[in-house]
Amino acid sequence: MYAGAAVAVGLFSVASPAGVAWLRCLGAAMVLLAWRRPPRSAWTGRTFLLAGAFGVVTAGMNVLFYEAIARLPLGTAVALEFTGPVVVAAFGSRTRRDVFALLLVAAGVLAIADVRLEGSLSGVLFALAAAAAWAGYILLGKRVAVGGNGIDGLAVGFTVGTVVLSPLALGTGAVWGSPRLLLLGVGVGVLATVVPYALDQVVLRKAGQARFALLLALLPVTAGVIGFLWLRQVPALPEALGTLAVVAGVALRSPGKRDGPAPL
């Protein structure tokens, strides 16, 4: 996911943030369709409507987040967007232990993100809208994983999302004249969407919505570990403490109810 984000930021100089997000959706749809080849039943009835809603919400989440990081420091945007999973986890908290775990995770993410209240109001609004869409991604993603067609649903969903958001392709003009840039756009879809969201479907089958939302807090932790091991970026004390708080919060969270398997 972070490799995909790095590539996406590099494309902002030749395409609009929303256009790059649309390319990400297009690339994901192409790869997933070639890989899964969803059956005809996946394109009809309730299954199609569920997958389509999931795809549009997820594609919209990516568009909103890319618009946010074009206007705000990345850490600020990440912290604001994470309010979506925090709300989902809060509604799923059943015990004092769960509440304490949630508070630990929220504090840890804020410390890791190094939140700074700077940037434009529009950036803040984009980030908060992305947070709402992230909550929708969790809720709909759970239904796709357990009651839908699993990864086949991703293929259908991102195809629908690509079509619905196709007007955003107007912001990608320069990309189509360069095979290299077009390949990078597809690469963003693979790195930032196909691989992580397919793995999300596996996890969503095994974990409740609230626990999954809390597990998402491991994303900034992973980024910090990669930065330390590969880029020799030594974390400051607040970041190190934030990492420990997130890990402790995820470990403390009650296991929660498991759902039955669904087709992948």
Image: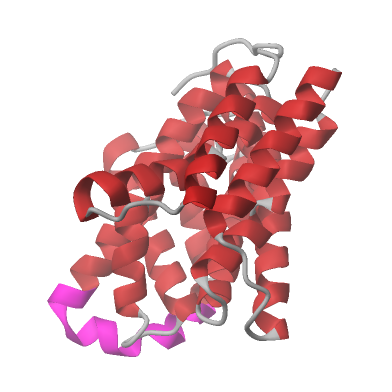
- 179 relative to 188 in the view: left or right: left
Q: Can residue 48 be seen in the rendering of this structure?
A: yes
- 246 relative to 181 in the view: left or right: right
Q: Does 168 lie within the magenta span?
A: yes
Residue projecting furthest to the front:
237
Residue 219 against residue 18 in the figure, above or below: above
Q: Does 115 lie within the magenta span?
A: no
- 12 relative to 204 in the view: left or right: left
Q: How many dots with numbers?
A: 0
- Give the overall secondary structure of the magenta segment: helix
Q: Residue 91: where, in percent of width, then height?
A: 84, 33
Q: Residue at x 32, y 64 (%)?
A: 6
Q: Residue 117: where, in percent of width, then height?
A: 68, 75
Q: Residue 253: where, in percent of width, then height?
A: 68, 20
Q: Residue at x 20, y 87 (%)?
A: 177
Q: Nearer the viewer, residue 197 or 26?
A: 197
Q: Residue at x 44, y 54 (%)?
A: 236
Residue 6 against residue 135 in the figure, above or below: below
Q: How is the image coloured?
A: secondary structure
Q: Can residue 43 be seen in the rendering of this structure?
A: no
Task: Place residue 194 in its image quadrant.
Answer: top left
Residue 218 against residue 248 in the figure, above or below: below
Q: Residue 174: where, in percent of width, then height?
A: 28, 89
Quadrant position of the C terminus in the picture: top left
Task: Place residue 148 in its image quadrant.
Answer: top right
- State the extent of the magenta-drawn residues as a range: 167-181
Q: Nearer the viewer, residue 71 or 12?
A: 71
Q: Residue at x 69, y 29 (%)?
A: 209
Task: Place residue 247 in its image quadrant.
Answer: top right
